[in-house]
Image: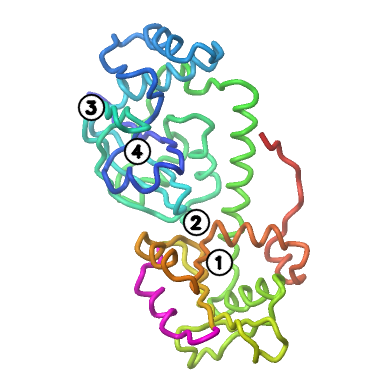
Amino acid sequence: MTRQKLWGIHMPAEVDTAPIDNQYIGIGWAEAGDLSALPADRDAFKQALSQAYPDAKDGTIRVWAGTMYRFIHEIEAGDLVVYPSKLDRMVNLGRVTSACLYASNDAHPNQRKVEWLGHVPRDEFSQAALYEIGSAVTLFQVRKYAGEFLKHLNLAEPEPVDDDEDSTISTEDDDTVTQEATKQAKETTSDFIIKRLKNGLSAYDFEHFVAHILECLGYHARVTSKSADGGVDVIAHRDELGFEPPIIKAQCKQITDTTGEPDVNQLLGTIGDGEYALFVNLGSYSKPARATERNKAKLRLIDGEQLVEIVLENYHKLAPRYRTLLPLRQIYVADL
């Protein structure tokens, strides 16, 4: 009897929400064409990829061939998949429902259909589990923390599988490995900051934190009364008394899931002449909400990743109580 596996896959941010919207996972190497017709032999994959990418190093070709081989020949319908999406900081969990398909008009043409079963914010997982799915390779098996992911679907942990690790653990050239290490360091820091802001502050304290961030950016800011804020949590302005436009009205949501268009429109309804709307959350925004932002010059949406960037850029200005909440040390990482 074939044992069910839990696969992890990385897809670049450029794919946007297409894998979720269209129910698939995919990998690239489009120049190699449809490799699913090749025999189930890694050497055949290496030869095809070498011909398509003559400038690639031998070690890189070996890794690519192993990834393609596993995607086409080792993943089976019924296997489970975890796809961490950087775009919205969600961990997407699903079940593979098809053999390998080739979509010639797609940048990631080698695809498998997937039934998505759940979409869980990253902060609901331990840092160790997030580190495992931050693997430096495109396709890998989730082993040590598989149960932590599957408990969100009320599914049992897959049995461990002894299989050939050829090219899955192998790494590519030094620059690629260094880039992946840098990326993981950044993701770990982002996860740490967002978890601390969500779990280490009350909702009202989070409003004060956002007000403080605006002060670090050069504004005067005050938190509105909790009893009657009308959807506006923070008011910020350039002049000390707050009489001169522009006036910024901010709403703060201490959530790590997706904020939709209705919440954004509610905030827009509070602004008048000379006023601007700022929405801040720890998660992401829906496509309609982002479309509203593009169409409204007086609206700005700050998601979790953007808030982390602002925190890092202004960390030296933070009050001691917030540096205690977010203890960080400056390090240098490779910028390749």
Say which of 52 and 297 sits in front: 297
Quarter of the rendering containing residue 242: bottom right
Q: Which mark is residue 99?
A: 3
Q: Earlier in the sequence, mark 1 or mark 3?
A: 3
Quote the CA–CA distance across marks 3 and 4: 14 Å
Residue 247 drawn above or below residue 52: below
Q: Residues within 10 Å of mark 2 (few under 14, many from 20)?
A: many
Q: Position of residue 249 (x, y in %)?
A: 54, 81
Disc 4 element: strand
Tell me where the magenta segment starts and ends, as one range.
258-274
Q: Earlier in the sequence, mark 1 or mark 4?
A: 4
The reply to whether callout 3 and callout 4 are in contact (CB within 8 Å) is: no
Which residue is disc 2 drawn over? 123
Q: Position of residue 326 (x, y in %)?
A: 68, 62
Disc 1 element: helix
Quote the CA–CA distance across marks 1 and 3: 42 Å
Q: Position of residue 107 (x, y in %)?
A: 37, 32
The reply to whether callout 1 and callout 2 are in contact (CB within 8 Å) is: yes
The reply to whether callout 4 and callout 2 are in contact (CB within 8 Å) is: no
Residue 242 drawn above or below residue 46: below
The amino acid type, in three-letter code, at marker 3 is Ala
In reply to whether residue 204 is colored magenta, the answer given is no
Q: Earlier in the sequence, mark 3 or mark 4?
A: 4
Quote the CA–CA distance across marks 1 and 2: 10 Å
Which residue is disc 4 drawn over? 81
Quote the CA–CA distance across marks 1 and 4: 28 Å
Quarter of the rendering containing residue 10: top left
Disc 2 element: helix
The amino acid type, in three-letter code, at marker 1 is Asn
